[in-house]
Image (cartoon, rainbow, N blue to C red):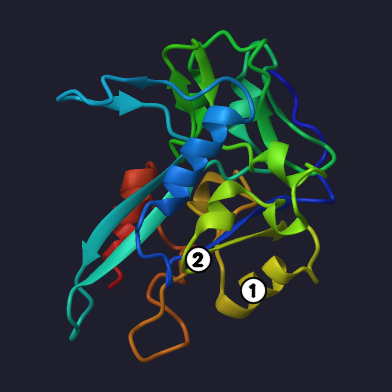
Amino acid sequence: MTALPPPSAKKLGLVIDLDTCVGCHACVTACKGWNDQGYGAPLSDMEAYGSAPCGTFLNRVHSYEVQPEDAAPQIINFPRSCLHCDNAPCVTVCPTGASYKRAEDGIVLVNESACIGCGLCAWACPYGARELDAEAGVMKKCTLCVDRIYNDNLPEEDRVPACVRTCPTGARHFGDLGDPDSAVSRLVAERGGYDLMPEMETKPVNKYLPPRKKGAVEASPLAPLLDVQATGFAGWLDRLLEKF
């Protein structure tokens, strides 16, 4: 197994606001479009217009209806992609070293020329963030649009992940979560941002901001997560939503 590098001082990542995400899937479309022309090979689709279409996506959005006490039903839209964990299990299990975490900015990437498509990283990831591109025969994942954020040929406002640039409600934020004074770090501190499935001890860089109760800006029923026990992403989310 590959040893993890020392934690990066710079930790580029996303902060996703569950209070303002409307589940429009603009981020999914932008991610698919950019990665079809940008980093690595295009993301394949099988039977895209058939009765059972499937394909490779690096970002997905799940929607859940919950029933808060003494309130109308509420829809929670939950975007999901790679969280660029400090203790990334996908990196430690990779038999070829294809999965790695960059020391300079903390981004987790896949060297597709070294990937054998064994799928061990997908089994190890508790967040379901790895996908096998069946056509290319390699594992793929969110790259934080590494080919955009460092591209001097793009206008400065475009040097962010495609999902962030396209989000119509401003629910996605990008920055250095290793800097406590950065805009994203301050946002996490002010809104009580949290790790996804903290009991897995993967130390994800990406954070989520909890939805607010209607008419309130204080603590959300989704905020106290440390006591949540779960055996996987689905179980974690199911137990979490029971707090409403």
Farthest bottom residue? Answer: 215
Lateral position of residue 228 relative to residue 94, left or right: left
Residue 172 found in image quarter:
bottom right
Location of residue 159 in the rendering, given as x and y in whole percent from the top left corner: 72, 51
Asked whether the residues under the numbered discs 2 and 1 touch, taking CB atoms below 8 Å apart as contact, a structural biologist would say no
Location of residue 41 in the rendering, given as x and y in whole percent from the top left corner: 57, 20
Q: What numbered label is drawn on residue 199?
A: none
150 or 194, which lies in front?
150
Q: Give the residue displayed 75% in from the left and 53% down from the top.
A: 155
Farthest left residue? Answer: 51
Lateral position of residue 76 relative to residue 205, left or right: left
106 or 140, which lies in front?
140
Location of residue 81 in the rendering, given as x and y in whole percent from the top left corner: 50, 43
Can residue 111 be seen from the camera position used here? yes
Can residue 141 be seen from the camera position used here? no
**Which quadrant of the rendered structure holds the N terminus?**
top right
Lateral position of residue 158 relative to residue 54, left or right: right
Mark 2: secondary structure = loop
The answer to whether 130 is drawn above or below residue 226 in the figure is: above
Q: Residues within 10 Å of mark 1 (few under 14, many from 20)?
A: some
Q: Give the residue displayed 85% in from the left and 40% down from the top.
A: 104
Q: Residues within 10 Å of mark 2 (few under 14, many from 20)?
A: some
Amino acid beneath label 2: Ala
Location of residue 4 in the rendering, given as x and y in whole percent from the top left corner: 75, 30
Q: Give the residue displayed 42% in from the left and 52% down from the top.
A: 26
Which label's residue is closer to the chain start, 2 or 1?
2
> Where does label 2 land, which residue?
171
For the residues marked 2 and 1, what is the alpha-carbon distance in whole angstroms? Answer: 12 Å
> Where does label 1 land, which residue?
187
**Which quadrant of the rendered structure holds the C terminus?**
bottom left
Amino acid beneath label 1: Leu
